[in-house]
Amino acid sequence: MAKPRVFISTDLKLTSEEKDDAQSLIHALLYQDKINIVGIAGTASKWGHQNGRVSDIDAIIDVYGKDLAKLQAHASGFKSVAELKAISHQGATAVAPSAGFSSATASSKAIVAEAKKAAAAGETLNVLTWG
């Protein structure tokens, strides 16, 4: 059976008081032997205090890379740092207007593309959001 396809959307900001966003991303990266992470989107918080920058996501991925060899020694399916950065996309960095969106972003386009790939394969795209 194929591993579930997962696209993560986060408003992660490393300088924020909310450390749970970083912890959630780290945990997701550690479970790649169970899930297929097909995308990571950085996007603004509803409340405007976190802007979800891909640079912060990349910083978490860099730390993950330090232990990648240890993870790969125990299980397969862990993407490289370069593979994870290639599937990380920037979303809106400002709070959306009352309509809920303003314009398409790299991350919204990536989510749509991955949903279409999943549908073509007869699978589901699971979009995880936290923030």
Image: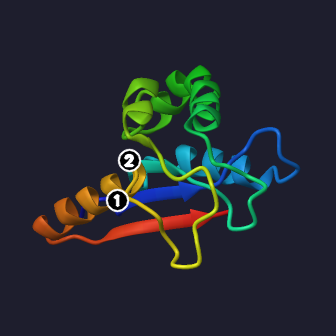
Secondary structure beneath label 2: helix
Q: Secondary structure at mark 1?
A: helix
The image quadrant where one finds the N terminus is bottom left
The color scheme shown is rainbow
In the image, 15: left or right of 114? Answer: right
- The numbered disc on residue 27 is none
Q: Quadrant of residue 84?
A: top left
Could you tell me which residue is drawn at 52 percent across and 75 percent down? 100
Residue 15 percent location from the top left of the image: 82, 39
Q: Position of residue 92 (x, y in %)?
A: 53, 53
Task: Compare residues 12 and 28 and report the one nearer the observer.
Answer: 12
131 and 94: which is toward the camera: 94
Say what amino acid the circle numbered 2 marks. Ala
Q: Residue furthest left?
A: 120
Q: Residue at x 48, y 69 (%)?
A: 101
Label 1 Cα neighbours within 10 Å, binned few <14 / some 14-19 / many ≥20:
many
> Does residue 107 sit above or below 47 in this rendering?
above
Residue 26 appears in which quarter of the rendering?
A: top right
> Does residue 16 sit above or below 98 in this rendering?
above
Which residue carries the number 1 mark? 111
Q: Give the residue number, with chain letter if any, for mark 2.
A: 106
Whether residue 34 sits left or right of residue 110 in the image: it is: right
Amino acid type assigned to the residue bearing label 1 in the image: Ile
Question: In the image, residue 8 lies at what x, y percent?
Answer: 49, 56
Going 26% across and 65% down the picture, which residue do you hit?
115
Query: In the displayed image of the protein, which residue is found farthest to the right?
Result: 17
Task: Describe residue 83's horizontal placement relative to residue 50 as left or right.
Answer: left
Lower sequence index among marks 2 and 1: 2
Query: Going by the picture, which residue comes out furthest to the bottom?
Result: 99
